Amino acid sequence: MNVAPQRRVQPPAIWRMPALVACLSYVGLTLVLTRPLVAHLATVLPNDLGDPLLNTWIIWWNAHAVPMTERWWNAPIFWPATGAFASSEQLLGLAPLTTPFQWLGGSAVAAYNIAYLASSPLCAMAMFALTYALTRRPDAAFIAGLIFGFHPYRVAHVSQLQMLSAYWMVIALLALHQYIGERNRTWLCVFGAAWLLQALSNGYYLLFFPTLLGLWIIWFGIRRGAARTLVTIIVVWVVASAPLVPILWKYRQVHALFGFHRFIQEIELFSADVTSLLDASSMLTFWGWLTSFHRPEGELFPGLTVVAILGVMTVTWLWTTPIPRRWSKVRLAFVIAAIVAVAAAISAMKFGSWSITIGKVQLLSVGRVSKPLTLALVALAAAVGSDPRIVAAWRRRSPLLFYLIAALAMFVFAMGPEPRLGSTVVLYDAPYGWLLSLPGFGAIRVPARFAMLAFLCLSVAAGLAFARLTAHAGLAMRRAAIAIAIVGAVTDGWYGHLDLVPVPLPLNTLNTLSAGTAIMELPLGQTEADTAAMYRSTFHKHPVVNGYSGFFPPSYGILRRGLSETDQSILDGLCSFGPVTAAVNEERDIEGRLTAWLLARPRVVPLGTESGWRFFSVPRWPDAAPDISGERLRIASVSANFATPDVGSMHDGSLSTRWASGGPQSGSEVVTVDLGSVRNVADISLALGSYAEDYPRLLAIDSSMDGTVWTTEWKGQTAPHRFIASVRSPRELPLIFGLPHISARFLRLRQLGSDPVYYWSIAELEVFGH
């Protein structure tokens, strides 16, 4: 039997031309909003020199080091710390756009600005394609793209390119919808590539997007006869994630080495609030006044247009859809349960905790508002979910209902582990708290960024709702609706002025230095000064001591404190890793304090001045803390003149326990070690563990054969040892003191310095020798 070959169906002209018009419209709106950035691509950055300049440097590094190599991970910032690139985003998902541009001769600043300008049109066009695939309506697709590409939440993150680059998520969802509809395996390849590129573009989306994908799979993939399709999607997802494994493993190693983590208080601080829906960026022209409920990262105002479209659609649906004549007993029970739970929550809010007890049996207690409110919301959701109209929408796998539910879920996640309405916790055991038990979530601090996924879902839902509302409208009515929606969407996301900040100028003195020296720009520790130092390294190509990222290596904090106190000894530790060229900004060097401090150091050579900067060559310094030699010696006993019950914690093999002096360092603390017999001693190690600030300010180490006659073997400041330890072993922080291979049975450690705040602590004491 002969089968005639099928003719390939061409996309209709109504798809091709509106897509071009939409693309040009999105690009034009972007250029108007960001004016005159396009005319200064290589000389300015939008908004500020914090995150934009950091991301510019990351983009530059991705183009000049082979990704995944040891050199790439050991990026030349936070010198001499290693693994510095794992302390922040790596933006590899943007490299297909930014790296070739630089290879062709473009600057890193221009590459950043191109990626920034492209982010809005790309998000909008991806949403246009997704909504068109679901509706076959170019007008609805255009409005959905306009909402997602230019919604108010994007303005709140104008400084964070990785947050703005959310288009790969939309393309991944488009590919899944198309694969479900067509069973064309090409769409599986698109899905895998989009997922991988999105995961490589933003660490938050790497962790957050799977929650949305999981909901999508449950809604569209779990149905009769779709098991094979579901398994295929999951297999492709797993295979596409394989390149992430070495990256995530390296992040895990570096974070474990440095002890990077987020405290729960920090995560709660950067969670959204219910009132965040009424908080908007002050940059917005028409909604910038919505700041009464402002909190960090909490500008989640969705705009009036999307709310109006979805509100009108909901009212219309309720009005036109037949209401079930009878409620099922189960649904009625859920409604009653919700009412009772709300009443309990209100009573707890007004009257405080209460309980009902019969005899010795407590039948009911209400102590926190969050528990009854959570029960009320669960019961209400069950009641709504059991509505026959909702059940029917589930059975036909309604995309509109899915994206509405998914948007609500993403907003709940955005509210973090303890969702609040003002100061009142409104959800008990919130879903984000479940995520904190998964790998990776403990390293991120801003649950509120789930909002980008919520706005993605709202944008799709708005496009679907607009298509439904205008499906039977006349031409005039439809055109009026389109015009109103376009004006509303543009108005919601319109901002009147975008600051364009000139990038820092290179310093020719640094560009002419010979290889082998690190650069330290002073003062150190201010965000835009440190990012400027990183940016200048793209010209002089030397490693820089300065740095800025999501996390900071322990050595950086120690160095900052030492420099702020103009502690000469901190340079001993820093320069033990190699020579340093210090560049001092005279405008920010108050009363020449840093300049005088450097000139007071032996062997420092002035290198001249340039454009308000003074330069100094600081030579390499002998290693203050040599590597340990010999074997670990057994310690018979340890005694101290303070906190004697805790001395055993010094040598119990655990960094989680410590001996502490019991009060701020006074200069009279003494610890004595008995080795049990005369041994040849080479090194002593005093590990600080997590007590980095409790190092002895001034230490003397004495030796004795009999415990009566003592000889001082070492004396000095320990700040250099602490810095060196923070580079070599940042989790253990062992202060290592080399001794001239002495023979002794007893060792005495005398803390001779003082500090008004910090104790002297020893988490683990070890002696090495023969």
Image (cartoon, grey):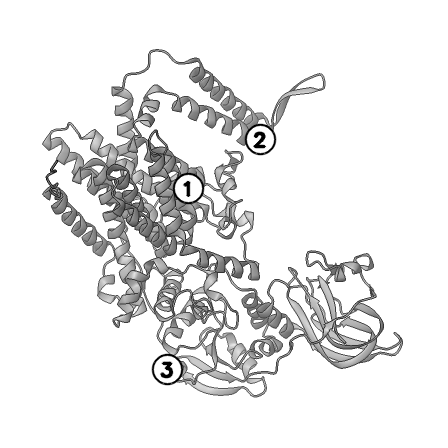
CA gap between label 1 and label 3 equals: 50 Å
Query: Looking at this view, is 428 or 523 the one in front?
Result: 428
Write the residue at 32% across / 23% down. 392
Q: Which numbered circle lies on residue 508?
A: 3
Residue 540 vertical placement versus 478 (above, below): below
First in sequence: mark 2 or mark 1? Answer: 1
- In this rendering, which labeled residue sits more in front, label 1 or label 3? 1
Q: Is residue 421 visible?
A: no
Name the side, left or right, on which 238 lies relative to 317. Answer: right
In the image as oriented, which residue stretches furthest toward the top? Answer: 326
In the image as oriented, which residue stretches furthest toward the front? Answer: 1
- In this rendering, which labeled residue sits more in front, label 2 or label 1? 1
Q: Quadrant of residue 737?
A: bottom right
CA gap between label 2 and label 3 equals: 63 Å
For disc 1, the marked residue is: 211
Tag 1 secondary structure: helix
x, y percent for residue 137 = 17, 37
For disc 2, the marked residue is: 368
x, y percent for residue 578 = 53, 80
Q: Amino acid at mark 1?
A: Thr
Name the side, left or right, on which 573 lies relative to 110. Answer: right
